[in-house]
Amino acid sequence: MNDLATGKLTSSPVMVRHPLNPILKPSDVPYGPAMVFNAGVTKFKGRYVMVFRNDYGDESKGIVAPHHTTNLGLAFSDDGVHWEVQPEPCWSWDDEEVVRVYDPRLSVVGDRCYMCFAVDTRHGLRGGIAVTDDFSSFEVLSLSLPDNRNMVLFPEMIGGKYVRLERPLPVYSRGGRDRFDMWMSDSPDLKYWGNHKLLLAVEQVAYANDKVGPGAPPVKTDKGWLTTFHAVDLDPARGKNGWEDTWKKRYTAGIMLLDLEDPSRIIGRAAAPLLVPEAVYETAGGFRNDVIFPGGMILEDTGEVKIYYGAADTVECLATAHVDDLLRLCLEPKG
């Protein structure tokens, strides 16, 4: 059953959570974060690579010190399931203007790996794009104006342009509260972005009443760009639902298909959620329970699709499906 009015949502039966979930948790990381989640995952130079968000918590609440620290960790894998975490974080950013960098998303374009990321500054939330060849150094190519983030980059140029999905955070212009939608833009050089278009509005998604935005970078299929997104519903009746004093939101994942030549055109979209918080590591014991946030998607030669997602803003997980089943969800007639 999927009914936002009653709060009852369920994951699609085509999705299979991996039996080893969570595939990455704080205890797997040698430098002691409180939470590891919202990772970018891709294949690069013959192996799986994951860049994940480390949060170190709030000392005043008894959560792992030091206070309010975030950086990015790095792990490699031969099979996309078992991960070798590197001994130190791969990137942090904290200066007179930047507070922290977080929520990486990885896309391989040509022979280089590009990382979209969010950055908190003292003058607003910004989204950025960096490039790396070795994950030990990152060249920042662009930063958006405030307030914009949740950016993901398509893995190839389309019509001679780079294309990204993004989620600006308007408040004043959307009634003074969360009402965030999914947009897209393009660029000739990854530095200057324009041609902004609304792609998916929150009111179009039956299981969202608060915001929608990009998930993992899209993957190319012969039917179109398979594209995940996050969808948020807010219920004022939810109380203490994690480590914070109150958490009233639920994050789910949806899926849609975009035209190969014109990705601003949605070919099809699953009417029901793809993934809903149901497993214990998604619904209990986390920093913010009832959260699923897809950040990486890999289409294997076998047709298996690996979707990596943060759960409860605390651990990183994996779910799989066959690409044909996901395409069918997007394209089947809506009854």
Image (spheres, rainbow, N blue to C red):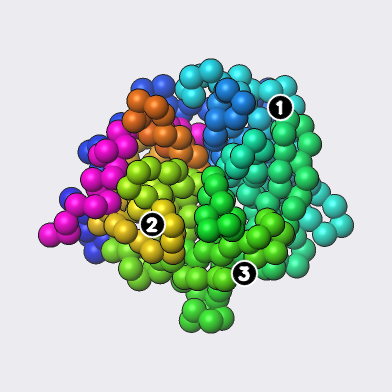
User: What residue is disc 1 on?
Assistant: 31
Label 3, label 1: how far apart the Cα atoms are: 40 Å
Q: Which of these two is toward me, 225 or 123?
A: 225
Q: Is residue 302 left or right of residue 160?
A: left
> Quick check: can you spot residue 273?
yes
User: What residue is disc 3 on?
Assistant: 194
Element under label 2?
A: loop
* Marks 3 & 2, CB-CB < 8 Å contact: no
Mark 1 residue type: Tyr
What range of the chain is rendered magenta? 312-335
User: What residue is disc 2 on?
Assistant: 259
* Marks 3 & 1, CB-CB < 8 Å contact: no
Residue name at image x 63 percent, y 49 percent: 116
Image coordinates for residue 179, horizontal then vertical, percent: 46, 71
Q: Is residue 117 above or below residue 278?
A: below
Label 1, label 2: how far apart the Cα atoms are: 43 Å
Please check the rendered image and state whether residue 131 is part of the magenta-colored stretch, yes or no.
no
Mark 1 burial class by Cα count in 10 Å: few <14, some 14-19, many 20+: some
Image coordinates for residue 242, horizontal then vertical, percent: 48, 46
Q: Is residue 92 above or below residue 100?
A: above
Residue name at image x 19 percent, y 52 percent: 332
* Marks 1 & 2, CB-CB < 8 Å contact: no
Residue name at image x 57 percent, y 71 percent: 195
Outermost residue, left side: 335
Element under label 1?
A: loop
